[in-house]
Amino acid sequence: MGGLLFDGMQYYANKTYDLQIIDRFGTGDTFATGLIHGLTQQWRHDRTIGFAIAAASLKHTIPGDLALMTEEDINTILQGHTSGHVER
């Protein structure tokens, strides 16, 4: 999974994720929510698109329409913890 952000002058991309899809429902909404969150926090564009991609990728692994995750969960993905094991 990957994505792009275009600010009118430049494209921004970030890491892509290979994943096993459990449920596709809600992933587009989750991507958009991650993007809006980053923009409203006034993060750099590369961080914003990375956050949105990580959020949508994580949502692919959660059954159902709701993205039951926290900002901390998404930041864990961004830090490279993608094994699926519980982090303590």
Image (cartoon, rainbow, N blue to C red):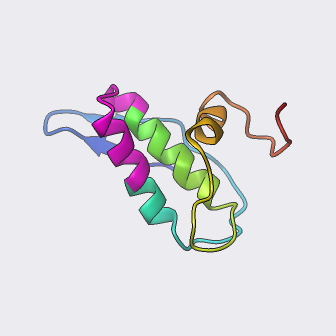
Q: Nearer the viewer, residue 35 or 11?
A: 35
Whether 87 is drawn above or below 44: the answer is below
**x then y, percent, for residue 61:** 69, 60
Q: Residue furthest left?
A: 8
Region rendered in magenta: 33-47
Q: Is residue 25 visible?
A: yes
Whether 83 is drawn above or below 25: the answer is above
Q: Is residue 1 visible?
A: no
Q: Residue at x 38, y 30 (%)?
A: 46
Answer left or right for 56 relative to 33. right
**x then y, percent, for residue 67:** 58, 60
Asked whether residue 36 is drawn in magenta, I would say: yes
**x then y, percent, for residue 25:** 55, 74
Answer left or right for 9 relative to 37. left
Q: Residue at x 14, y 34 (%)?
A: 9
What kind of secondary structure does the magenta stretch mostly adopt?
helix
Q: How many numbered marks appear? A: 0
Whether 60 is drawn above or below 49: the answer is below
- Image quarter where the C terminus lies is top right
Please identify the quarter of the rendering in which residue 22 is found. Answer: bottom right
Asked whether residue 83 is drawn in magenta, I would say: no
**x then y, percent, for residue 86:** 85, 41
